[in-house]
Amino acid sequence: MAQSILQFTSTDPNTSASSTSLAFGSNVTAGSTLLALTMLNFTSLGATQFQDTLSNTYTLINKAQSSAGPGNQTFYLYAASNSHGGANTVQLNLATASAVRGLLILEVGGTAASPLDGSAHNDQASPGTGAGAVLSGSASNANQPALAIAFSLPIFTNSAPTAVSPYTSQGTFWGISTGAGRCEYQNLTSTGSQQATFTATAGTTEHLSLIAVLDALATIYQPFGGQAGFFVNDIVLQ
Protein backbone atom coordinates (compact mmCIF):
# COMPACT_ATOMS: atom_id res chain seq x y z
CA MET A 1 0.00 0.00 0.00
CA ALA A 2 1.53 3.32 -1.10
CA GLN A 3 1.57 6.16 1.37
CA SER A 4 -1.38 8.49 0.99
CA ILE A 5 -3.70 10.76 2.94
CA LEU A 6 -6.83 8.66 3.39
CA GLN A 7 -8.96 11.14 5.34
CA PHE A 8 -8.78 14.90 5.97
CA THR A 9 -11.36 16.87 7.95
CA SER A 10 -11.42 19.99 10.10
CA THR A 11 -13.61 22.15 12.31
CA ASP A 12 -13.35 25.72 13.58
CA PRO A 13 -16.13 26.16 16.19
CA ASN A 14 -15.42 29.85 17.01
CA THR A 15 -17.27 29.53 20.32
CA SER A 16 -15.72 29.38 23.77
CA ALA A 17 -15.20 25.89 25.28
CA SER A 18 -12.43 23.81 26.81
CA SER A 19 -12.45 21.00 24.24
CA THR A 20 -13.09 20.26 20.56
CA SER A 21 -14.18 16.89 19.17
CA LEU A 22 -14.10 15.75 15.55
CA ALA A 23 -14.91 12.36 14.02
CA PHE A 24 -13.31 10.74 10.99
CA GLY A 25 -15.90 10.18 8.28
CA SER A 26 -14.91 6.53 7.75
CA ASN A 27 -13.35 3.82 9.89
CA VAL A 28 -9.62 4.26 10.49
CA THR A 29 -7.43 1.51 9.00
CA ALA A 30 -5.31 -0.34 11.56
CA GLY A 31 -1.65 0.65 11.27
CA SER A 32 -2.31 4.14 9.88
CA THR A 33 -0.69 7.27 11.29
CA LEU A 34 -3.10 9.92 12.59
CA LEU A 35 -2.15 13.61 12.60
CA ALA A 36 -3.91 16.25 14.72
CA LEU A 37 -3.30 19.96 14.19
CA THR A 38 -4.54 22.88 16.29
CA MET A 39 -3.78 26.56 16.89
CA LEU A 40 -4.33 28.10 20.31
CA ASN A 41 -4.52 31.71 21.49
CA PHE A 42 -4.40 32.96 25.13
CA THR A 43 -4.57 29.39 26.41
CA SER A 44 -2.62 26.12 26.50
CA LEU A 45 -3.20 22.45 25.94
CA GLY A 46 -4.80 20.46 28.73
CA ALA A 47 -3.06 17.70 30.65
CA THR A 48 -4.27 15.02 28.21
CA GLN A 49 -3.79 17.21 25.08
CA PHE A 50 -5.31 14.84 22.50
CA GLN A 51 -7.23 11.62 22.97
CA ASP A 52 -9.47 9.47 20.79
CA THR A 53 -12.03 6.71 21.02
CA LEU A 54 -9.52 4.10 19.78
CA SER A 55 -7.22 4.81 22.78
CA ASN A 56 -4.30 5.87 20.59
CA THR A 57 -1.42 7.86 22.14
CA TYR A 58 -0.63 11.26 20.61
CA THR A 59 2.82 12.83 20.82
CA LEU A 60 3.99 16.31 19.83
CA ILE A 61 5.80 16.45 16.46
CA ASN A 62 6.47 20.19 16.27
CA LYS A 63 5.00 23.61 17.01
CA ALA A 64 5.25 27.11 15.55
CA GLN A 65 4.64 30.16 17.74
CA SER A 66 3.73 33.59 16.44
CA SER A 67 6.21 36.35 17.23
CA ALA A 68 3.99 39.18 15.98
CA GLY A 69 0.40 37.97 16.19
CA PRO A 70 -2.12 38.54 18.97
CA GLY A 71 -1.83 36.38 22.06
CA ASN A 72 1.29 34.53 20.87
CA GLN A 73 -0.80 32.11 18.84
CA THR A 74 0.78 28.66 18.63
CA PHE A 75 0.37 26.04 15.90
CA TYR A 76 0.68 22.47 17.32
CA LEU A 77 1.09 19.23 15.31
CA TYR A 78 0.61 15.88 17.10
CA ALA A 79 0.70 12.31 15.78
CA ALA A 80 -0.52 8.86 16.80
CA SER A 81 1.50 6.12 15.09
CA ASN A 82 0.34 2.58 14.27
CA SER A 83 -3.30 3.38 15.03
CA HIS A 84 -5.91 0.88 16.09
CA GLY A 85 -8.65 0.35 13.52
CA GLY A 86 -12.31 1.33 13.64
CA ALA A 87 -14.62 4.30 14.04
CA ASN A 88 -12.74 7.16 15.67
CA THR A 89 -13.40 10.57 17.22
CA VAL A 90 -10.46 12.77 18.20
CA GLN A 91 -10.76 15.22 21.11
CA LEU A 92 -8.59 18.28 21.77
CA ASN A 93 -8.42 19.23 25.47
CA LEU A 94 -7.56 22.76 26.64
CA ALA A 95 -6.39 24.00 30.02
CA THR A 96 -8.99 26.80 29.92
CA ALA A 97 -11.95 27.65 27.71
CA SER A 98 -11.15 29.43 24.44
CA ALA A 99 -12.94 30.43 21.24
CA VAL A 100 -9.72 29.70 19.28
CA ARG A 101 -9.71 25.91 19.21
CA GLY A 102 -9.75 24.78 15.59
CA LEU A 103 -8.95 21.12 14.95
CA LEU A 104 -7.70 19.37 11.81
CA ILE A 105 -7.29 15.58 11.67
CA LEU A 106 -5.73 13.40 8.98
CA GLU A 107 -5.33 9.67 8.46
CA VAL A 108 -2.19 8.67 6.56
CA GLY A 109 -2.04 5.11 5.25
CA GLY A 110 0.96 3.02 4.26
CA THR A 111 3.27 4.40 6.97
CA ALA A 112 5.87 2.59 9.04
CA ALA A 113 5.03 1.63 12.62
CA SER A 114 7.34 4.41 13.86
CA PRO A 115 7.14 6.76 10.88
CA LEU A 116 8.38 10.19 11.99
CA ASP A 117 11.55 11.04 10.05
CA GLY A 118 11.97 14.78 10.41
CA SER A 119 9.94 17.92 11.06
CA ALA A 120 10.36 21.70 11.06
CA HIS A 121 8.45 24.94 11.55
CA ASN A 122 8.67 28.54 10.42
CA ASP A 123 7.20 31.94 11.32
CA GLN A 124 7.22 34.71 8.68
CA ALA A 125 5.90 38.14 9.64
CA SER A 126 5.43 39.34 6.05
CA PRO A 127 6.45 36.81 3.38
CA GLY A 128 5.15 38.75 0.37
CA THR A 129 3.14 37.28 -2.50
CA GLY A 130 6.05 35.97 -4.58
CA ALA A 131 5.74 32.39 -5.82
CA GLY A 132 6.92 30.01 -3.10
CA ALA A 133 7.77 32.81 -0.66
CA VAL A 134 6.08 31.06 2.29
CA LEU A 135 8.49 28.44 3.66
CA SER A 136 7.77 25.50 5.95
CA GLY A 137 11.26 25.29 7.39
CA SER A 138 13.68 22.49 6.41
CA ALA A 139 13.11 18.95 7.68
CA SER A 140 15.80 16.33 7.09
CA ASN A 141 14.71 12.74 6.38
CA ALA A 142 17.09 9.78 6.66
CA ASN A 143 14.86 7.26 4.87
CA GLN A 144 12.88 6.95 1.64
CA PRO A 145 10.30 6.44 0.29
CA ALA A 146 8.47 8.84 2.54
CA LEU A 147 5.62 11.32 2.54
CA ALA A 148 6.09 15.01 3.39
CA ILE A 149 3.00 16.82 4.68
CA ALA A 150 3.06 20.58 5.23
CA PHE A 151 0.64 23.14 6.64
CA SER A 152 0.59 26.94 6.42
CA LEU A 153 -1.80 29.39 8.06
CA PRO A 154 -2.05 33.18 7.77
CA ILE A 155 -3.16 34.30 11.22
CA PHE A 156 -4.78 37.64 10.35
CA THR A 157 -6.94 36.65 7.37
CA ASN A 158 -9.05 33.87 5.87
CA SER A 159 -7.12 34.02 2.57
CA ALA A 160 -5.40 30.63 2.37
CA PRO A 161 -2.02 30.38 0.63
CA THR A 162 -1.78 28.23 -2.49
CA ALA A 163 0.24 25.04 -2.94
CA VAL A 164 3.47 25.11 -4.96
CA SER A 165 4.72 22.22 -7.15
CA PRO A 166 6.09 19.59 -6.62
CA TYR A 167 3.69 19.61 -3.66
CA THR A 168 0.00 18.89 -4.23
CA SER A 169 -2.79 20.62 -2.32
CA GLN A 170 -4.78 18.38 0.01
CA GLY A 171 -7.22 21.18 0.81
CA THR A 172 -7.95 24.14 3.07
CA PHE A 173 -8.90 24.16 6.73
CA TRP A 174 -10.37 26.46 9.40
CA GLY A 175 -11.51 30.01 8.76
CA ILE A 176 -15.01 31.31 9.48
CA SER A 177 -16.06 31.99 5.88
CA THR A 178 -13.32 30.36 3.79
CA GLY A 179 -10.43 28.01 4.42
CA ALA A 180 -7.72 30.01 6.14
CA GLY A 181 -4.99 27.36 6.12
CA ARG A 182 -3.57 25.11 3.40
CA CYS A 183 -2.32 21.52 3.60
CA GLU A 184 -0.07 20.10 0.86
CA TYR A 185 1.93 16.90 0.43
CA GLN A 186 4.66 15.27 -1.67
CA ASN A 187 5.79 11.65 -2.03
CA LEU A 188 9.56 11.58 -1.54
CA THR A 189 12.04 9.22 -3.21
CA SER A 190 15.19 10.84 -1.86
CA THR A 191 16.70 11.66 1.53
CA GLY A 192 18.06 14.98 2.78
CA SER A 193 16.63 18.42 3.36
CA GLN A 194 12.93 18.82 2.54
CA GLN A 195 11.20 22.20 2.51
CA ALA A 196 7.65 22.85 1.35
CA THR A 197 6.69 26.20 -0.14
CA PHE A 198 3.41 28.05 -0.51
CA THR A 199 2.38 31.26 -2.24
CA ALA A 200 0.66 33.77 0.03
CA THR A 201 -2.53 35.48 -1.14
CA ALA A 202 -2.14 38.03 1.67
CA GLY A 203 1.59 38.70 1.67
CA THR A 204 1.72 41.25 4.50
CA THR A 205 0.01 38.85 6.93
CA GLU A 206 2.05 36.71 9.32
CA HIS A 207 2.20 33.03 8.28
CA LEU A 208 2.89 30.05 10.55
CA SER A 209 4.02 26.86 8.79
CA LEU A 210 4.91 23.27 9.73
CA ILE A 211 6.23 20.21 7.88
CA ALA A 212 6.51 16.55 8.89
CA VAL A 213 8.05 13.61 7.01
CA LEU A 214 6.58 10.12 7.51
CA ASP A 215 8.43 6.97 6.42
CA ALA A 216 6.69 4.35 4.31
CA LEU A 217 5.91 0.82 5.43
CA ALA A 218 8.56 -1.69 4.34
CA THR A 219 7.63 -3.63 1.19
CA ILE A 220 7.20 -7.37 1.73
CA TYR A 221 8.34 -9.66 -1.08
CA GLN A 222 8.52 -13.39 -1.78
CA PRO A 223 11.66 -14.42 -3.72
CA PHE A 224 11.53 -17.40 -6.09
CA GLY A 225 12.16 -20.57 -4.11
CA GLY A 226 13.36 -18.52 -1.15
CA GLN A 227 12.34 -17.23 2.22
CA ALA A 228 10.04 -14.21 2.56
CA GLY A 229 11.72 -10.95 3.37
CA PHE A 230 11.27 -7.21 2.96
CA PHE A 231 13.01 -4.13 1.65
CA VAL A 232 14.16 -1.30 3.91
CA ASN A 233 15.93 1.59 2.15
CA ASP A 234 16.94 -0.69 -0.73
CA ILE A 235 18.48 -3.28 1.59
CA VAL A 236 16.97 -6.77 1.42
CA LEU A 237 16.40 -8.40 4.82
CA GLN A 238 15.66 -12.13 5.16
Image (tube, grey):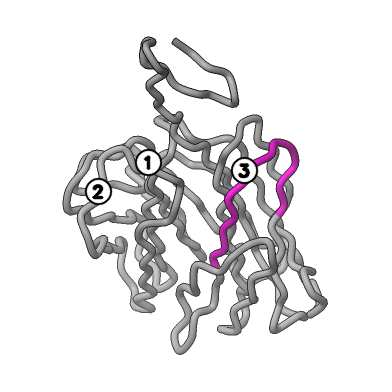
Quadrant of image for the N terminus? top left
Mark 3, secondary structure of its residue: strand
Q: Is residue 50 above or below residue 103?
A: above
Q: Position of residue 149 (x, y in %)?
A: 56, 54
Verify CB contact (< 8 Å) between mark 2 and mark 1. yes
Give the Cα distance between marks 2 and 1.
Answer: 10 Å
| Front-most of residues 28 and 225 | 225
Give the Cα distance between marks 3 and 2.
Answer: 23 Å
Residue at the spot of label 2:
52
Q: Is residue 192 visible?
A: yes
Residue at the spot of label 3:
119
- Label the magenta part by its dominant secondary structure: strand
**Crowd class of label 2 (few under 14; some 14 to 19; many from 20; radius 10 Å):** some
Q: Position of residue 125 (x, y in %)?
A: 76, 69
Q: Residue at x 38, y 78 (%)?
A: 14
Q: Residue at x 44, y 30 (%)?
A: 219
Residue at the spot of label 1:
80
Q: Is residue 211 magenta?
A: no
**Crowd class of label 1 (few under 14; some 14 to 19; many from 20; radius 10 Å):** many
